Amino acid sequence: MARSSGRDRSDNSAVPKTVVKITNPSTGLSREATTDSAGYYSIPNLPQVLTIFCQLKRFKPLTKKGVDVLINNVTPVDLRLEWVG
């Protein structure tokens, strides 16, 4: 299995308490994590191709599709949220 980790930011500032959900679109298998106070998340034991979704109040939802992760590696995926204006 693989691991994805990254940082959630908006305008170079950390966005804590963002729920990050990673799903394998082929199987429906999903995992969730919440970013820490510095905006970091880490999700272990992942399948190989993922869709990443994150959402937090006052920000636009963000989806990244077709993210490839390598087995026995950590795949960094940083996320940048935009304010809802």
Image (cartoon, rainbow, N blue to C red):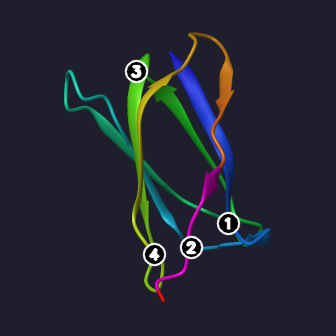
| Residue, disc 3 | 49
**Mark positioned earlier in the residue sequence (3 or 1):** 1
Q: Where is residue 28 in the image (x, y as percent from the top left)?
A: 20, 32
Mark toward the viewer: 4 or 2? 4
Question: Dot 4 lies on which element?
Answer: loop
**Mark positioned earlier in the residue sequence (4 or 2):** 2
The span from disc 3 to disc 1 (Cα, nearest Å) is: 24 Å
* Chain part drawn in magenta: 79-84
Q: Pointers 3 and 2 in contact (CB under 8 A)? A: no
Mark toward the viewer: 1 or 4? 4
| Residue, disc 1 | 36
Relative to 70, residue 28 above or below: below
- Number of residues whose C-alpha sits closer than 10 Å to that of mark 4, classed few (under 14), some (14–19) or many (20 or more): some
| Residue, disc 2 | 17
**Residue at image x 56%, y 73%?**
17
Q: Where is residue 36 in the image (x, y as percent from the top left)?
A: 67, 66
- Tell me, yes or no, whether the highlighted magenta stretch contains residue 17: no
